[in-house]
Image (cartoon, rainbow, N blue to C red):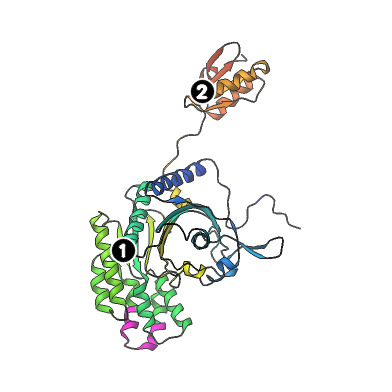
Amino acid sequence: MKHYDKVTPDGTRDLLFDECVSREEVVSRLTAMFRSRGYRQVITPAIEFYDVFGSSAAHFPQENMYKLSDTRGRLMVVRPDCTIPIARLVATRLTGMPMPLRLYYCENVYRVEHTMRGKPGEIYQAGVELIGSNSLRSDLEIVELAASGLSDINGESFRIELCHIGYFKALIDSLDAGADTKEAIRQCIEQKNYPALSDLLAPFGDSRAAAALGYLPRLFGGEEVFGKAYELFSENGALECLDYLHGLYEDLRQLGLEDRVIIDLGLVNQAEYYTGLIFRGYFDGIGEPVLSGGRYDNLLGEFGAPLSATGFAVNIDPAAQVVGEPAPQTPDILVFSDERHLPEAVNYIKSLTENGLVAENCVYDDFDAAADYARRRGIRQLHVVDDAIEVVDVETLKGEGAR
């Protein structure tokens, strides 16, 4: 029988040293900014009842969730998403709070990836939820917050793509097509699969909605996108959605984000989950989105609390790739003593750390072994605690014999 005691499960990996430092640096920058804007932290369980995600099967199919059972045989899942448990939390424990609620989280999500080998199944996220407001003000706050977070991580080397899912819904609802065909069209638009999209739309002839859907993956850019979108289709609620997105875009331009914000009306992922604004964030040199979010006004109603909401999540590990090399983690001082002076050595280490130094306790009994360890670790000073403190420059010991 094959044993798996020396490997990690598919989609997971060990993080070492600098990777941990870079990850925590990203989280520190984001959470400091979240708190400065009035957001408060919540933590939900890593294990939830399956029923919490049962109504979200279109977004998190059961085959994409890690499942287990509790002591009473009830079906549980390992959290595949942070927003849905927060919706449960708000609907059951926070409905009496003054609205809007500003919440943030830093948690792992776990998803089974069947088709893309190498894609992570354990994803560390930090994100925010703004609950209880459906105004343009709240969407502007969330997008600007996302831009500020990306800027705090990597300066101006980012972009945000904006869409209003209502425009796509106005188009797709104007087609006389079945649910399976509509979903296939959505997937082709999302993937920018032009040949397959053209084949799917061919049976609809000269329908304006079909023509607009065929052009949707190309509606990508700046101000000029709106003129073309208005020209293509403005019925069935499409005009109002474009007007809303245009107004938001103008506000973001006035905030100095014109060069960072792109309109992409082909951004149609999770069309049944999102109800309005959708956006994604990218860093230069990273080929996948590091941030995704949008408005989801129907989710909390599924838990009995019909509240509007918007938010975003940052995938921390790809974001950590751009924060630069972390500062060296080598201790400043190695403290060595004989057994008689161990308590004094411990107190001495405390005094060093209270003064901002990084001091490591030496576990070797032999001075030469201590000096050799310090050299291998790159520790420059060896402090010997005896009846007095002796400071030894490790570099001067090279080639010397025993002390």
Query: Whole-Å distance between the Cαs marked 1 and 2?
Result: 53 Å
Residue 157 at x, y = what percent? 33, 51
Q: Main secondary structure of the magenta part?
A: helix
Q: Nearer the viewer, residue 144 or 304?
A: 304
Instruction: Provide the residue span drawn in magenta.
Output: 199-212
Residue 49 seen by the camera: yes
Task: Bin the neighbour count of mark 2 within 10 Å (Cα to Cα): few under 14, some 14-19, many 20 and up.
Answer: some
The amino acid pointed to by label 2 is Leu
**Residue lying furthest top in this view?**
387
Tag of residue 136: 1
Q: Is residue 365 left or right of residue 163?
A: right
Q: Residues within 10 Å of mark 1 (few under 14, many from 20)?
A: some
Furthest residue toward right: 1
- Is residue 210 covered in magenta? yes
Please name the residue shown 47% across and 24% down the image.
355
Identify the residue under disc 2.
Answer: 352
Quadrant containing the C terminus in the rendered view:
top right
Residue drawn at (44%, 80%) of the image: 182
Numbered tag placed on residue 236 in the rendering: none
Amino acid found under the numbered disc labelled 1: Leu
What x and y, as percent, mark residue 90? 49, 60
Residue at x 51% of width, y 31% of height:
330
Q: Secondary structure at mark 1?
A: helix
